[in-house]
Image (tube, helix red, strand yellow):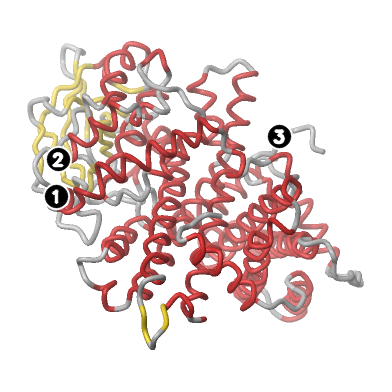
């Protein structure tokens, strides 16, 4: 048993035990009530009005946000003394998941409660928070976040918006243009990022939308999330009182990065809800639609698709709440060491920034798969704008771009871990050298395990050796140029994403077995085993691509031999496992795992 709580990124070099993780099987009655409240809200306020929402009926989305505010849904993360509920981090993820099936509403909700409210909550001074947070928590005021510009998207710090101090020193004069601003059409409070004079880094300002000199372009016409307001915002000599600077001068870039960490894991939770919603739509249709005299859910090809939808979603769910609990534990540790709640929360989330990026990528790509197969199972009906899955398919596409593109996030995963290794916060090179030494030794012949998931435990050790071998060799071989080798970084990031999810699902199912026994967990075991079986091939391919990209001759041969050893799995029948998973879905008539 470990005495120290796990650190962000440490999953690659450290074995985690079931006692260190939280699983969805452990939600309390109170948690279930919050989830049910969110489900009811979507069923009553969103789904019956979805066409009106998508047509952007004047005033409709703001009024729905106000109703969410009346229920307390906008103030879940806000402390009680500022008019909120003050729930812990994983509970805020749970609410985000259960509102994630709300199509465009979930985008407006996420922007308001996340990037709209949190910069002020975590970086504002007391008078700023007292002035604005209670209004945001009730929905009386709506919030938006103005970072992106026409010339600065992924490279956010290159923004051109300028702030100049007035002669009397009482105000900043703001000039510039922001684009893709979610909630831009109706927001009352804008968090705007600008550079003061010739500063290197951005500074953040709280700007009231009714200020003179702010103008908006018409609503953007978008592929999906049509009901969410997305506009360009122009600032023409806008007067901002000096007391509305958020945090310190030039701290804006840091604020943006930390708030994006939160946005990433929240996106992972939101798309989890979207995936479950799409699975529920799929099974309903597959259980009703008849072809060739049978309902289509009885066909093997359809069962494969439904089982795979479930596997990816269940694995994502396992990883999301594992990380959520890790963040809560880190926050509690920082509070115990004397930090206030806001600073502790930021530090706790920053500690698990690699996992936040992993979940953003894994989640958005899981949802993409799920909605794509939902359309396929619906067939021609899925392509019709009258079907719910058509909207889900279009709405899902933005998630691979939101909160930093998946390509940027993949590079960040590796970059953050390597930086921590360079600083001595994460010992990656020690274990990597050990694996390199192991390549020269004779492999031990391990017998297959009789334990339900004993083989998978061993496979996981091998998977971790793969990433240590590839990343360790790449760092040594390429040194300073590695940061430019994006293809190799993508390969290593994929290894990290699959390994984190594999370990998460393994721990969740092991914990479930400890409580309920193997027989009761047959379907969960099938999910974990199938994910591991598929991951072995994926890991071998990505690692091989990376090895061939920087090594040759004997060096490459040695690593490829190690790779074969580290990704070797026992014979396994994936068809039977998927049939079992699909059968449970067919019988339950909904995602209930």
Q: Nearer the viewer, mark 2 or mark 3?
A: 2
Identify the mark nearer the N-term, 1 or 3.
Answer: 3
Going 36% across and 26% down the picture, which residue do you hit? Answer: 75
Whether pointer 1 and pointer 2 mark residues with C-beta atoms closer than 8 Å, the reply is yes
Between 418 and 8, which is closer to the camera in this rendering? Answer: 8
Q: Secondary structure under badge 2? A: helix
Going 68% across and 66% down the picture, which residue do you hit? Answer: 529
Q: Is residue 340 left or right of residue 382?
A: right
Q: Position of residue 499 (x, y in %)?
A: 64, 59
Q: Which residue in the structure is indicated by mark 3?
A: 5
Between 138 and 258, which is closer to the camera in this rendering? Answer: 138
In the rendered view, would you say 452 is above or below 189? below
Between 141 and 204, which is closer to the camera in this rendering? Answer: 141
Q: Which residue in the structure is indicated by mark 2?
A: 60
Q: Callout 1: 10 Å neighbours few (<14), some, many (20+)?
A: some
Q: Which residue in the structure is indicated by mark 1?
A: 52
In the rendered view, would you say 16 is above or below 244? below
Which quadrant of the figure contains the C terminus? bottom right
Residue furthest out toward the bottom: 292
Going 40% across and 23% down the picture, which residue do you hit? Answer: 78
Q: Is residue 454 left or right of residue 121?
A: right
Q: Is residue 442 left or right of residue 40?
A: right
In the rendered view, would you say 291 is above or below 357? below
Q: Position of residue 11 (x, y in %)?
A: 68, 48
Mark-to-mark CA distance, 2 and 3: 46 Å
Mark-to-mark CA distance, 1 and 3: 48 Å
Q: Position of residue 494 (x, y in %)?
A: 56, 63
């Amino acid at each position: 048993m470990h005495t120290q709580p796990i650190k962000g990124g440490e999953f690659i070099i450290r074995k985690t035990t079931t006692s260190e993780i939280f699983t969805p099987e452990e939600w309390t009655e109170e948690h279930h009530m919050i989830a049910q409240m969110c489900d009811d809200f979507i069923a009553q306020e969103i789904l019956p009005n979805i066409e009106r929402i998508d047509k952007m009926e004047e005033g409709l989305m703001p009024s729905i946000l106000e109703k969410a505010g009346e229920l307390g849904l906008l103030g879940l993360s806000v402390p009680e003394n500022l008019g909120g509920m003050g729930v812990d981090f994983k509970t805020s993820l749970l609410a985000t998941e259960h509102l994630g099936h709300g199509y465009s509403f979930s985008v407006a909700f996420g922007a308001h409660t996340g990037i709209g409210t949190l910069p002020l909550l975590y970086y504002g001074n007391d008078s700023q928070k007292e002035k604005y947070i209670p209004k945001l928590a009730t929905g009386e005021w709506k919030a938006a976040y103005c970072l992106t510009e026409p010339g600065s998207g992924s490279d956010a710090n290159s923004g051109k918006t300028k702030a100049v101090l007035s002669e009397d020193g009482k105000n900043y004069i703001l000039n510039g243009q922001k684009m893709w601003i979610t909630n831009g059409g109706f927001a009352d409070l804008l968090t705007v990022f600008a550079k003061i004079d010739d500063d290197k880094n951005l500074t953040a300002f709280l700007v009231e939308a009714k200020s003179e000199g702010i103008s908006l372009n018409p609503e953007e016409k978008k592929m999906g999330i049509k009901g969410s307001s997305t506009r360009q915002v122009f600032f023409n000599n806008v007067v901002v009182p000096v007391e509305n600077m958020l945090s310190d001068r030039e701290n804006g870039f840091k604020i943006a990065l930390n708030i994006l960490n939160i946005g990433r894991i929240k996106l992972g939770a939101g798309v989890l809800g979207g995936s479950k919603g799409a699975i529920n739509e799929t099974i309903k249709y597959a259980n009703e639609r008849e072809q060739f005299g049978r309902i289509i859910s009885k066909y093997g090809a359809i069962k494969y698709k439904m089982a795979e939808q479930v596997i990816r979603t269940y694995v994502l769910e396992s990883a999301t709440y594992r990380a959520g609990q890790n963040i809560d534990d880190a926050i509690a540790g920082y509070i115990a060491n004397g930090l206030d709640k806001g600073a502790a929360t930021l530090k706790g989330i920053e500690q698990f920034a690699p996992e936040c990026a992993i979940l953003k990528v894994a989640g958005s790509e899981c949802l993409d798969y799920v909605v794509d197969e939902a359309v396929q199972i619906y067939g021609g009906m899925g392509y019709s704008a009258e079907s719910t899955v058509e909207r889900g398919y279009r709405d899902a596409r933005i998630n691979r771009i939101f909160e930093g593109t998946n390509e940027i996030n993949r590079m960040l995963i590796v970059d953050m871990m390597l930086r921590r290794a360079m600083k001595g916060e994460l010992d990656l090179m020690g274990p990597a050298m050990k694996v390199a030494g192991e390549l020269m030794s004779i492999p031990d012949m391990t017998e297959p395990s009789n334990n339900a998931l004993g083989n998978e435990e061993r496979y996981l050790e091998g998977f971790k050796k793969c990433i240590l071998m590839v990343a360790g060799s790449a760092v040594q071989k390429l040194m300073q140029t590695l940061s430019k080798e994006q293809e190799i970084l993508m390969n290593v990031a994929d290894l990290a994403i699959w390994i984190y999810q594999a370990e998460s699902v393994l721990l969740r199912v092991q914990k479930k077995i400890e409580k309920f026994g193997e027989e009761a967990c047959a379907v969960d075991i099938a999910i974990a085993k199938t994910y591991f079986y598929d991951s072995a091939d994926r890991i071998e391919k990505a690692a091989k691509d990376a090895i061939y990209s920087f090594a040759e001759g004997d060096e490459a041969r040695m690593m490829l031999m190690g790779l074969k050893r580290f990704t070797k799995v026992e014979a396994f029948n994936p068809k039977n496992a998927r049939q079992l998973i699909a059968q449970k879905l067919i019988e339950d008539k909904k995602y209930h795992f």
